[in-house]
Structures are given as structure tokens and as C-alpha cells.
Amino acid sequence: MNKLKQVRGVDFHCHVDLYPNPIEMIAACDSARIVTLAVTTTPKAWFQNQRWTKLSRYVFPALGLHPELVSNRHREIALLEEHIEMSRFVGEVGLDGRPQFRKSWQLQAEVFVRALSAAERYGGRVISIHCRRAAGEVVRCIESHTTSGNVLAILHWFSGSETVGCRATELGCYFSINHQTLESERGLNLVRSLPEDRLLTETDGPLTHMGNRKSEPHDVLVTMERLADARGISVATMRDVLTENARRVLRFANVRLHGDESET
Ligand code: MN
């Protein structure tokens, strides 16, 4: 067997389809060996993402319905429920508790619970979850509507309290860490409180910035370094931890990363 190349980084929440040239971005993830979860904001977008990533070895599309779009597009939850049979990855779904989305809160909750319940019915689903100003409620929904071992939830850009982080950990959740979280003392303390075997990195690109340009998946390499620094371990160890965590999450979804074949 060929000596397979190592994964260099993990971007477990990226809107690949929102870059000007998604096909180029997918090719860039493949050549940079960045394992990438390509989340979508509507179930309709998932089809195109699925086509684009068909030949990719590092980019995996996820079926989503973004909470910020729920007020207008809540009916599309029916499409998500229909297509989830074909998609092991779900996201971006979740709740947004900011004032500007308060009006859609009930609808958001209804849509999120339906997405969780659909994942629970099929099992073996990995879900990337938006929990901005709603971490407590998101974790309560995960607890009420899914069983750990059947659905694997990843709290994307988690910024809840350490108590909520603990509860989420008990429920089997993972956490994808955004570089912006590592810019505040509170965020640093939060990532230090999370268990090592539940950590992933993400960009949420192109909706976030790295300096004065839009973030791209390879920026997780910087996040990985900062995360290693925050937790007092070497970058090489951090990379091994993140790669192993990503492999475990992918295996849960019955996806084997190449290089996995050699393991038993
Ligand atoms: Mn996002």
C-alpha cells in the first residue's frame, strides 16, 4: 500500500459554497489535506455541494437549514427530513438567541427539533449545530430528542458557560473551536475546560475574517497552533488529537478517511 499522506488540519464547519469559487476551494482543501465539513444553509444547496464534493477525499457535505433563515424558509425542513436518508452529515442547523431573531424563536425551535428527530430516526448522523446565545437550550434539545451513540452533535463556535459545556460533554457532544474564540480570555478559559478528545477546529468561513481577508479552510492551521498554545501542548500533538477526533467523528458517520484502511 502507498504510504498515505497525513491530514494537516480539520475545518469542521465551513460554508464552502459561499466562496466565489467553491470548486476551487474544495480542490484547495484536498491539496492542503484539510478535512472539511461543508455545511449548507438550505437543503436545496446541499444537492449542489454533494455534486461538487463527489470526488473529494477531504470535503464532506452536510444538509442544513440555518436558524437565521428559518423565518423565511422554515417550510424547507420538510426537504431536510426527506433528504436526510441520503446524508450522514447534517448542518448547519440550530438556534440563535440574539434579539434580531427573537421573532422566529418558536419556529427555530420547531425546525431544530424536527432536524434532531429526523437524525435520531435514521441514526449514525453527525450534526453541526449553531448555538449562538442559545447554548443551554440547544443542549436541552439534544438531550430530549437524541440519544448519544445514535446521533453525534458538534457544537459549532461554542461560547456557552463551562457548566453547559460539561453537560454537553456528558451527552457526548464535540466542540468545533473557531479562531475568534481564542481571541478572548473567556474563550481561552472555555477551550481549556473542554475535554481533549472532543475538540475539533473550524473557520465558519467565509463568514469570518482572518486579519483583513475572509477566512479559508487552511486557516485552521493557525487555530490549531493557538489551541495547542492555549492548552500547553505541542502543535504536533494537537494535530494528532484533532486528526484522531475527526477520524472518530467520520467513522461514526460510516465514512473512512483515507489512511484509515490500515487500522483495524
Ligand atoms: Mn456557519
Image (cartoon, helix red, strand yellow):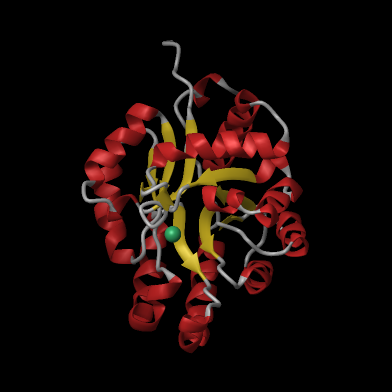
Q: How many numbered marks have been drawn onto this rendered protein structure?
A: 0
Residue 201 in sight from this viewpoint: yes
State which quarter of the image contains the C terminus.
Answer: top right
In percent of width and height, residue 34 lies at 43, 34
In this rendering, position of residue 134 left or right of residue 53:
right
Residue 55 in sight from this viewpoint: no
Q: Quadrant of ligand 1?
A: bottom left
The residue lying at 71 percent from left, 40 percent from top is 196
Relative to 216, residue 166 above or below: below
Relative to 157, residue 65 above or below: below
Quadrant for residue 79, please give it.
bottom left
The residue lying at 50 percent from left, 41 percent from top is 254
In percent of width and height, residue 21 lies at 21, 46
Relative to 259, residue 170 above or below: below
The residue lying at 35 percent from left, 35 percent from top is 29
Relative to 261, residue 118 above or below: below
Quadrant for residue 224, please give it.
top right
The residue lying at 39 percent from left, 51 percent from top is 205
In percent of width and height, residue 164 lies at 73, 64
Q: Nearer the viewer, residue 260 or 128?
A: 128
State which quarter of the image contains the N terminus.
Answer: top left
What is the residue that sits farthest to the front in this orientation?
Answer: 212
Quadrant for residue 31, please give it.
top left
In this rendering, position of residue 247 left or right of residue 172:
left
